Image: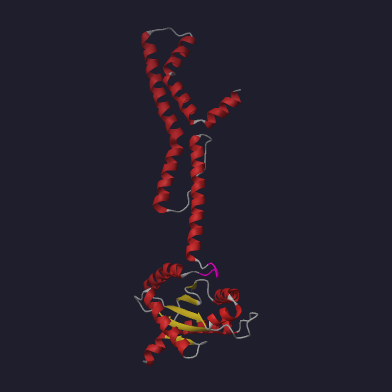
Amino acid sequence: MPTRILRILRRSLTLKIFTLCFVCVHMPLIAVIAYLGSGFGAEPMPLLFLLLIATVAGTGLCFLGLWWLIRPLKELASAVETYQANGGSLNLAARSEDEIGTVTAAVSTMVTRMDGAVRRLHHQATTDALTGLGNRRWLSERVDDELARASRQAEPLSVVLFDLDLFKAINDSHGHHVGDQVLVAVAQLVRTHLRRYDLAARIGGEEFCVVLPRTRRADALMIAERLRKAFAALEMLPLPPGSVTASFGIYEAAPGDALQHILSMADKALYDAKRTGRNRIADAAQLASDR
């Protein structure tokens, strides 16, 4: 029976508060009963002094007890406010079995699930579902940070824009499922040939963008050439050898360039590569000097 009562007491905040207040309010009476029961006389002054001490002690004990019982709720509120202001994780351990412990555990679980759902939604919103590369939205978010970092540290940044040649003919002749396989294979080759800090995104049907931090145009040309050769060597049945090729446009960003301008300059170079025969690389800086 006592064990059951203790279990009920642990799980009920209301019962804890009631028990605490009951004991604290009746502490003067308990003290008087204990005093008289111990055989002491009923002189007025000692009794008044005892009542005063018991009242002060009961009040202090009640305050401390209530603070201790409600402290987890205050910690929960503080953690939620911090989470709302700064984000991050909400790691809270339920230290009691009462209602506050139940709410703390529930809030922690809900926030964890919500964070996971938000991360999944963000991943879905910024990732190309077919190739697994980033999409145009993801590219916009990341490139702004890379441009700002390159500007602060006075480092170069180059962009490679490429488009698969005659991709519509592949879809028309062999079906869209083959075209999808080509896109997936191309994305895998891009991952294989890039460094861990490079950025790659599919920004159109068969158009891709690669952002190369800390890279001059000469090095960007070499990376693009490796990709061009890898695509041309790709063997995919039922396509004949050499069916997968791409045209490339290269641009090294200048200080203060915005993403739209960078893509525009690389796109002009890409268009020139298409116009002059496909399966080749054009450099925006070279085009500008030729003019």
Question: Residue 204 or 108: which is nearer the viewer?
Answer: 204
The part of the chain drawn in magenta is: 129-133
Q: Reply above or below: 98 against 291.
A: above
228 part of magenta stretch: no
Q: Where is residue 152 in the image (x, y as percent from the top left)?
A: 37, 71
Query: Farthest front residue?
Result: 172
Residue 130 visible (yes or no) = yes
Q: Tell me the quadrant of the picture where the C terminus can be found.
A: bottom left
Is 15 left, or right, of 243 in this rendering?
Answer: left
Q: Position of residue 171 (x, y in %)?
A: 56, 78
- Which color mode does the image show? secondary structure
Question: Residue 125 or 265: which is nearer the viewer?
Answer: 125
Query: Farthest right residue?
Result: 237
Q: Where is residue 27 in the image (x, y as percent from the top left)?
A: 44, 19
Q: Position of residue 80 (x, y in %)?
A: 43, 46
Q: Reply above or below: 146 against 10.
A: below
Residue in the image at 42% along x and 81% along y: 267
